[in-house]
Image (spheres, rainbow, N blue to C red):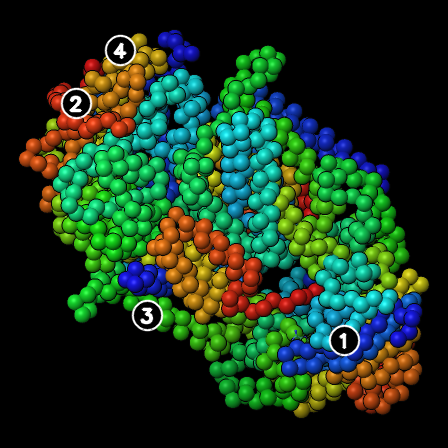
Amino acid sequence: MLEIRNLIASYGPVLAIRDISFTADAGKITTVIGANGAGKSTLLRVISGLEPATSGSITWQGHSLLNKTPEAIVRLGVAHVPEGHAVIASLTVAENIEMGALFRRRAHKQDVRVAISEMYALFPRLEERRNQLAGTLSGGERQMLAISRALVSRPSLLLLDEPSLGLAPLVVEQIIATIKQLCISTGLSVLLVEQNANTALAVADHGVLLSLGSVVADQPASLMRADSALRSAYLGY
Amino acid sequence: MDTALTTLFLGTTRGAVFALVAMGLVLVWRGAGIVNFAQMGQAMFSTYIASSLIISGHGYWFAFATALIAGALLGALVDVAVMRPLTKRSHSGILASESMRATVPVIASLGILGILQSLAGMLWAAEERGFPSPVSDVAVKAFGKTAPFTNFDLFIIIVVLLTLAATTLFFTKTGMGLAMRATALNPEVARLSGIRIGRVRTLSWAISGVASSLAGLLITPSANLSPNTLDLILIVGFTAAVVGGLESLPGSVVGGFILGLLIAVVNVYDAPDDVFLALLIFLLVVLIVKPGGLFGSKRVRNV
Amino acid sequence: MFKYKRTGIRNLAIALIFTVAIIALGAILDPYNQGQLAVVSMLFIGVLSVTLLTGTSGQISLGQGALMAVGGYASALTILNLGLSIWFALVMAIIVSALAGLLLGFAAARLTGPYLAGTTLVLALALPSLAIRFESVLGGDVGLNVDFGNPPAWLVSAFGEIGYEQWQLYATVPLTCLALLATANILSSRTGRMWRAIRDHESAASLMGINVSNNKIFTFVVSSGFAGLSGALYGLRGIVGPSVYPISLSLLLLTGAILGGLRSIAGALIGSALVVFLPDLIEWATRPLALSEQIGNYLPGLIGGVLLHLTVILNPGGIAHALHRHKNK
Amino acid sequence: PANAASDPGVTDTEIVLGMQLPQSGPASPGYNKVDDAMRAYFDYVNSKGGVNGRMIRLEVKDDAYKAGLTVSTASSLINKEKVFAFVGSVGTQTHISVIKDINRRGIPDIFVNSGYSGFYTDPKKYPNSFGDLGTYVVEAKILGKYLKETYGDKKIGILYQTDDFGRNAVAGFATAGLKFTPKETAATFIAGTQGSLGLVSQMSQLKAAGVEVVIIAAVSSASAVAISTAAKIGYAPKKWAIISVGADATTIQGLLYAGGVPFATSAAMLTGVISASHAPAAGDSSDEFVTAFKKINDDFNKGPSKAWDNNVLQGMNTAYLTTEALFGVGKNLTRKALVSYLETKGSSLSSAALVPLGYSKATHEAYTGFWVGAYDASTVLKPVGTDRVVYTTDSGSGPVTVSTYKRPAMPVDALPKGA
Amino acid sequence: MKENSLLSVANLSVNFGGLNALSDVFLQVNANEVVGLIGPNGAGKTTLFNAISGLVKPSQGTIALHGEKISWPEPHQLSKLAIARTLQGVGLFAGLTVLENVMMGADRHRSSHFFRDIAGLSSRDEARLRERGMQALAWTGAHTFADKFPDQLTYPDSKRVALARALVLEPALLLLDEPAAGLGHDDIEKLATLIKQIKSKCAVLVVEHHVDFVSKISDRVYVLNFGKVISSGTFGEVKLNPEVISAYLGASNDSGTSSLGGK
Ligand SMILES: Nc1ncnc2c1ncn2[C@@H]1O[C@H](COP(=O)(O)OP(=O)(O)OP(=O)(O)O)[C@@H](O)[C@H]1O
Ligand SMILES: Nc1ncnc2c1ncn2[C@@H]1O[C@H](COP(=O)(O)OP(=O)(O)OP(=O)(O)O)[C@@H](O)[C@H]1O
Ligand SMILES: [Mg+2]
Ligand SMILES: [Mg+2]
C-alpha cells in the first residue's frame, strides 16, 4: 500500500504540492488526474525521489520513501516512467532495457534474462530495433522503450506519467491491457498520471483528482467517471 | 632509413603515453560527461608524491602504487568536491542552456588545475626534478646493434595496450561499464533505473585518475617534473582524444599513436618549433573534415 | 514601450559616465594604481570579448589570449614597419584580429563545449611559435618594442604634468568607452538577442531563419576584434612578444568574466578589476602574516583557482548576478 | 631628472633596491634561488653596518616570466616601493618589456641577469642598463675557438633552444668558425618544452648525423635531459660541451638524482664535460670568494633551498658588485652618480669574476672574458690546460685574445669598499 | 497535380540504412487548409516532416512548394521558404523573455543590421519588432506574460508562446508535430479553436495521435503505415477504412476512440 500523508513540495517559491494525502492500494491501478500544472508530475517525482518534499510522509509497503535517493527507491521496487520519452538516446535499445535491470543483475541473473525477453515479447517493435540507437526511434517507440526500461526491474509499484503521450491509440490500448494484466498476475500496483481522464478512469480502480496541488476528490474510478459535475468543474468538460 | 625507423619508434613510444592521457580524458568524458582539464594537474600531483617517496628512500614500486592510489583519490576528490555540487545545481539561470552546461565544468576543471599547480608550487617548486623509470631505460641491444627503443619504451606500450584492453572490456562487457555510460549520458534516467550515479561517477573519476597518474609516472622519466610540465602533455592528449572522437577508447589510443607519430615526424623532418603549429593544423583539419573525430559517432542533423 | 526607444541613448550615457568616473579616479590615484587601472581598462575589453563570445553566444574560448596577441602584433607591425600612429595601429589590430577570428570561427562553428575549449587552447599554445617561426618579421621570443609614447602636448598643457601610467590610462579609456558602448548596444539589440537565441537553442534559432553557423563565426569575428584591441593596448605597455600573451592570459580573461558575471557588462568590469587587483589585495592582506616567498607567490594562483571554483559551484552567474538577480539573464 | 635631494629610495638609513624575476611558474626553477642569495649577502652587509650607514633593502617581485606582469611589477617597484635602482633582474623576454620605461625615468638598471647583448651594446638606447653576465656571444666565441682548435677533426654538433640565448650562442660559434647544418648537426627545441616532451628526437638526430662533439646551449634542466637521453638511446658522443648557463652541476645532478641516477653515476657522466665560466667554479673550494660566499650563504640565506650552486654564486656576486658600486659612489648617492660611476669606474670593480667588467661609455656589456674548463670526477670545473687561461673578446667580430687581468684579492671582511 | 496546391510531395522515399522509413509517398496541402497526418508509431510521420524541412535527405521523389521544387533546405532557409515548424516539446529560448522569444520569430521583417545595432541606431526597428511580437502573442492569448521567462510559464502557456513564435514568421505552411501532446482537455479545445483561426493565415500540416483533435481540426487527413500512405480523405472517410482501423485506430474503434481520444 502506498500511503501519502500531508505531503508538501515546492520548486523554490512555487508551491507545487500543497498538503496531499491519499492511499493507493496494492495490486490496483490508481490514477491521478487533473489539469495542466495541477502537480501530477511533481507528485510522481517526489515519490520517486527526484524532487525533495518539504514535509509530510510517503510510505510504500511500510518503507518510508522520504529523503531517499531515486536509486534507493527503485531498489524498494518503485519504478518511475517520467514524462516525455525518458530513454538514453546514445545507447542502443538493448542497452536501455538492460540498464533497467542492472541493479538486479547479480542477485537475479536468471530472472533478468527472462524479464528482458518478456519486454521484447511485449513490444516486438523494440526487438526489431534492438541495436538501433534509442535517439533514432520514433516518438512512440521511445515511449515503449521507456516503459520497458521500468518494467524490466520487476517493480512492485509502477509510476506512469502520461504513458499515452505520443502513442497511437492502438498501442495505448495494448499497453493499458498489459499493465492491467500485470496487476492481476503479479500484484503490481500502478500510479497512473493522465491528462486523458476518460482513458485513465476507464482502466483504473481508483481515482485521485488534483487541482492546484491539492486533492479535490479521492474515490473509486467508476464513481468519478460518472460524476460529470466534478469533471466539468476541474477538467473542463 | 635509419632515421625513418627511429622516427617510427619514437612516435610509437611517445604516442603510447599520449594515448594514456587521452584514455584518461575519455574515461571521465564517458563516465561523467566532462572534459577534465585538471587531469594532468592531478597526474603531476601524484607523480610528485611518488617522487618525494623515492627521494626519501622508499622503493620504486611502493611509490608507484602510492601514486596510483593518490591518483584515484584525487580523481574521487575532484568529483566529490567539485563536480557533484556542480551537477546538483538546478538547471536554471546561467545553466539553463545546454551550451553553458557543457562549458561550466570546463571552467571548474581549470579552477582545479590552478589550485593543484599552486599547491604543488608551494610544496615543491624550489627545483625541477627528474623521475626514475621502473625498468631499464637503456636502448635494447640486439645482433650487436642498438635498437632505437628501450625496455622502458616496450614497457609503456604494453601497459597502454593492456589498459586499453581492460577498459574497453570494462565498458562494453560489464554492467558497471554500462552504468557509467548511462550516468554520463542521462543521469536522471540512470538514477531511475537504480544506478547509484554518485558512486558510479566517483568511480569513473577515480579510474581516470589512475590512468592519468600512470601517464604521469610513465612520461616524467623521459622529461622532467615541475608543476607545469605536464600541461603540454594534456594538450597533446586532449588533441589525441578529440582526433579519436572523445567517445571511443580505441579511438583515443589510435589518436595518441597518430599524434605521437605526427610529433616525431615534425620533430625529425621539420623543426621542433613547428610541433604545436602542426598540432593545431592537424586538429583543425580533423575537426573540419570529421567534426566528431575519426572514431566518433556521426552527428545527425537534428532539431 | 517608450522606455525602449532610448536604449541607444541610455547606453551612450552609461559609457560616458564610466569614462568620466575612470578619468576622475585616475586623477586621484597614485601612479602604480593608475597603471593598474589602465590594465583593468585594457583587460575589460578582453573580458567583454568573453562576455560576447561565451556569455552571449555560448561558445567557450581558451584562446582569447592568442587573439590578443594577433592584435598586439598587428599594431606593433603597423607602428614599426609602416611608421603610423598608435591610433591607426589600433584600428589595424581590430581588423587583423577580426580576420583571425574569422579563420578560427570557421572551425569553431562546428564545435561545441569541450571541443571548442580544447581547440582554442591548442591555438593559444601554437600561436607563439609563429613568432619564432617568422622571427625576422615578428621578432622571435624577444618581441617587438612599442609603447604609448609621450602624452600629446595639448593634453599636458590642459592638465599639467601627466605621468606615464596616467597617460596609459587616458589613452586607453576612450577605447574602453567605445568597446563598452558597442557591447551595450549589441546586447540590447537584435544582434545580441540573436546570439543569445543561438546559445539557448540552436535548432530553434535556425527555424527562426537564423543562419546559426554564420552567426557563430560572426560572433567569433566580433569577439576577436575586441580581443585584438585589448591585446594591442596591452602590448603598448612596453612590448609585444610571446611572453606577453601566455596561455595564462586567456585563462585570466575567462576567470575575470566568470567571477564578475559571464552575462553582464558590469560583471565584466568587476571581473577585470578583480583579476588585476587580486594579487595586490592578497599581498596587502597577508603582509602581517609574513608568508614565505614561495607561498606568497603561489597564493594568488591558489586563491584565484578557489574563487573560480566556488563561483562556478555556488553562484555561476558571478558577482554581478548576485548583486542583481534576474537581470541580464 | 634625478638630483641628490629628491632621488627616491635613498634615505640616511636605507637604500631600497628592486628586482624582478620569475619566482613561480614554468620558468622559475633554478632562478628562484638568485634573489635569496642576493638578499643573504645584503643581510650580511647590513649586519656589518650597511653601506655608509645605510641598510640595503631588496624588494623582489615575482613576474612568473610573463612580460605583461613585469610591467606591473616594475611599476609597483617604482611607484609603490620607490626603489632607488633595479638590481639583478632575471629574464630576457620579461626585461625587454620594461627596460625602455626604466631608462626613460632615469632609474639605474644595474647588473641585469641576462646575456642578451641587445641590452648593453648601445648605451645611447639604454643609458642606465648594465649587464651582469658575459654575453652569450662572447662565451660562444671563446668556447668555439677552443673546440675548433681541439676537436677540429671531429664532427661537432649543437643542441640549442630557439630563443635569444640559443641563437646568440649559435651566432658566437659561427664567428669562431663553427657552423652547423640544420636537421643534421644542429638540433633545436623550444625553451621549456624539454620538461614535458623530452629530447629523444633531438638526440637521435645528432646520433644519426654521427656527431662526435655535442655542444649544448640550453638551461641546466634541459642539459640534464639531453645527457640522460643520450645515455638511454645508446648515444655516447666523445665530448660534451655546455654553455655555462646550462652547466650547473648541482642542478643537473639533482635532477638526475630524482630521476634515479645516483650521484656517483651522474658525476661520472659529467666528468670530462667541457664548459666555460667567467668566475671560479662553484665547486672550487680553493677559491677565496667561493669559500667566503658559501659561508655567508650558510649564515644568512633564508630561502626555501639554499643548496650551494652556480645560481647562488651568481646571486652573491651580483650583490657583492652592487655593494661595491654603492660604496664607490659614496655618501652622496644619486641615480645619476651611480650610472656615471659605473660607466667610468665600473671596469675596475672587482668581484669573484676572473675578468673585469667591460663597462665603458661605448658599451655596458659585463664580462668580456671566459676560461674554458672540464668537470673533474667531483664535478668541479677545472681548467682544460694545466693553468687557467682566461680569454677575452667582444660581442662583435673582434678577435679572441688572452686576458692579462689579475683578480684583486678579496677584502678580509668580504666587504668591497669601491674602486 | 493540382495547380493551387501549396505543398506537394510526390513519390517520396526515405531510407535509413536498410529501413524504408518512407516509400512512395504522395501528399498535397492546399492553401488555407489543415491537413492531418496520422498513423501508428514509427510509421514515418516525423520523418516526412524532417524531409520537408531538410533534416533528412530523401532517396527519391520531389517536394514542391507553390509548384517549385525544393531540395535539402538548410533549417534557416525554411523561414525564407515561408515554412514554419514547431519543435516537439517546446524549444523556447530559456534566456530570452517571452516577448524576445517571439521577436526572434519576427526577425524576418527586420531592417536593422549589425553595424546599426552596434552603433545603437536600431531602436526604431526594435520597436517595430516588439509591436509585431506583441500582436502575435495577443493572437495566441499569451500577451499577458510577455515579460516573463520561459521557465516561469506553465506547459500549455509555453506551447502558446511557441505557436506565436512560429506564426509571427508569417508562414505559408505551418508544420505542427504533436501540438496537443501533454495538454489537458481544456487546452486542447482552445488549441483546436486557434488552429481553425490560423487557417485563415496559412496552411497547416499537423501530426497528432489525439484522434479527436485531428478529426476536429483537419479538412483532410493522410494515414501512414510502414512508410506508405494507406488512406486519405476526410477524417470521416478514413476512419471507416478497415486497414486504418486495424493498423491504427484499433478494433474497438467505436467505443474505444471516444474513451481513448478524449470525450
Ligand atoms: N522545474 C520546475 N521549476 C519551477 N516550477 C515548476 C517546475 N516544474 C513544474 N513547476 C510548476 O509546478 C506546478 C506543478 O507542475 P507539474 O508538472 O507537477 O504539473 P502536472 O500536473 O504534471 O502538469 P502537466 O499535465 O502539464 O504535466 C506547475 O505550476 C508548474 O509550473
Ligand atoms: N536516423 C534514423 N536512423 C535509423 N532509423 C530511423 C532514424 N530516424 C527514424 N528512424 C526509424 O524510422 C521509422 C519512422 O520514424 P518516425 O520518427 O518518422 O515515426 P513517426 O511516424 O513520427 O512515429 P511516432 O508517432 O511514434 O512519433 C521509425 O521506425 C524509426 O525507428
Ligand atoms: Mg505532468
Ligand atoms: Mg514522431
**Label 1 is found on which chain of the structure?**
E
The mark found on residue B158 in the picture is 3
Seen from the viewer's position, the closer of residues C57 and E134 is C57
**Badge 3 sits on which subunit?**
B
Q: How far across and how far down the image is residue A120, in percent? A: 63, 87
Note whether ligand 2 is within 8 Å of mark 3.
no
Instruction: Mark 4 vs mark 3: give the one in front.
Output: 3
Q: Name the amino acid type tagged 1.
A: Gly
Q: Which of the two discs, 4 and 1, sits closer to the camera?
A: 1
Foreground disc of the pair 1, 2 = 1
Tag 2 residue: D414
Distance from the alpha carbon under mark 4 to that under mark 1: 98 Å
Label 2 close to label 3 by CB (< 8 Å): no
Q: Is residue D321 above or below residue D164?
A: above
Read off the residue under disc 1: E61
- Residue C66: x and y, percent? 51, 43
Left or right: residue A190 versus residue D160 is: right
